Image (cartoon, grey):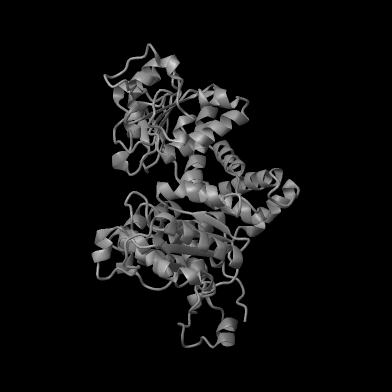
Amino acid sequence: MSDPAFNKGTAFSIQERDRFGLHGLLPPHIESLDEQVQRVYEAYQRKDDDLERHIYLRALQDTNEVLFYRLLLEHIEEMLPIVYTPVVGQACQLFSHIYRRPRGLFISYPMRDSIGALLRSRPYSDVDVIVVTDGERILGIGDQGAGGLGIPIGKLSLYTLIGGIRPERTLPIVLDVGTNNAERLKDPEYIGWRHERISGQAYFDFIDQFVKAVQQELPQVCLQWEDFATPHARPILERYASKLLTFNDDIQGTAAVALGAVMGAVGVTGKPLHEQQIVFLGAGSAAVGVADYLRAALVQDGLSEAEARQRFWMVDKDGLLHSDRHDLSPEQQVYAQDSAKLLNWPKTAQGAIGLADVIQQIEATILIGLSTVGGAFKEPIVREMASKVDRPVILPLSNPTSRSEACPEDLLRWTNGRALVATGSPYAPVVWDGRTIPIAQCNNVFIFPAVGLGVVASKATRVTDGMMLAAARALGEHSPALKDTAGSLLPPLSEVRSVARAIAEAVGMEAQRAGVAPVTTRPELIARIEASQWLPEYGPVAD
């Protein structure tokens, strides 16, 4: 009863109570799982605020995992925001204050020479998926130090809830390299290493020690990097992507779910992807990551690399990226337009070309915001775009809501209901002209659990960009908007578990095509996926 993986609580049978000496420790009535779910849901509803609900669910997870996941599965739309974003952000900020019992591993810099031993402290020997963070860039709230462990815990809950990865085969880890958050360091209850963050070569050496220990202890595990700061995220991914089964959800997962939403929208417009003109507001790592996947999809659809690049118009705080700018990173230079094409375009006194000017000059079909500038998609800009295309695709993807480039209600009003919209933050459905239009949220939950399921079922040894592109295309194929033009660009959360199986199939087949997974027939792969997707049901208890 003390092990959440095996505990059934009041659902232990008479035979199990006899066998394990549980009589007297449990009330006499034997409940069904459904009865237990009803009881714990009533307790959940009595909680006064979202943080208390999060704490309650975490306590239930630490007590009875089957009951925890069955409860979540039956109330997925209500509870997903509680167990993960946005409430998990508050839980990370208060992690030291709401800490109850161990879950996952703390790997602290002072113990860098004992990482192997720390990994051997894991509660279960067999692990399929690790989610690891260093706590530096937690959602939109920044450096939370050791409190960042709340993110891997929440993320892996979704691997199980949606992907069906067995809960005891997941392992959340925080790499505690200190924190530069003065509030955390001054907090007398802070449970992390009280030290400023390790940086420079010492930091990367520590990451290398961690990876080598993982390779030694768990050579087949899928290692997902989560919420690392931009200066670290891409170098870490590039260093290890070809050496182990690994990916970065912030870079690759975000790009894949955005591409999935775009693919669904493109299917509605009737205009093929390779004919789209794509405008970005924002040119940071997230925007470049999304652009990279869109560019790869354009090449898959038949464009040359040079032709694909010309389809992108990327604007940052200093204006349109073009070849005469000398302040661009190598990743941004890929999307710099030839300045010779821009000679007659309007410019500011400093020579900058703004978003409004770009929309004025070209026939933009897709507008994506990853700028964190709230309200940046102004009415004149949107109306100008909509005057040139029948179904403008507009994705204000910045988080949180206050930083969203536009609210969906305005976008639909300014386009007379013609805009195809997906957002980064959650929004309520919009009523327009007698129709209720659901607003898709580009939540990575559509991608990473399915990728995990596909990797485990196919026995893949690497996660390739091709596998992530396959996931995105499969997601796009399940867009409700393809059947109902007033439908959401992404599936409802109530269907996300079944959609995950289809995405896992696409991931597994692409892994085989790329030579990073054993070859099987498609029916064999589907059978493996179905067998790998754990269900929250009570089974027999082993000795």
Relative to 483, does residue 343 appear above or below in the rendering?
above
Evaluate whether residue 217 shows in this view. Answer: yes
Q: Quadrant of residue 244?
A: bottom right
Q: How many marks?
A: 0
Relative to 31, does residue 530 appear above or below in the rendering?
above
Quadrant in the picture for the C terminus = bottom right
Residue at the (39%, 26%) spot, across then down:
325
Q: Residue 92 at what x, y percent from top left?
A: 34, 60
Q: Residue 53 at what x, y percent from top left?
A: 34, 62
From the viewer's side, name the closer residue of 487 and 303: 303
Relative to 154, does residue 67 appear above or below in the rendering?
below
Q: Residue 256 at what x, y percent from top left?
A: 52, 41
Q: Residue 367 at what x, y percent from top left?
A: 42, 28
Relative to 399, does residue 42 appear above or below in the rendering?
below
Q: Quadrant of residue 183?
A: bottom left
From the viewer's side, name the closer residue of 17 and 444: 444
From the viewer's side, name the closer residue of 484 and 55: 55
Q: Is residue 346 left or right of residue 445?
A: left
Residue at the (58%, 65%) spot, across then down:
127
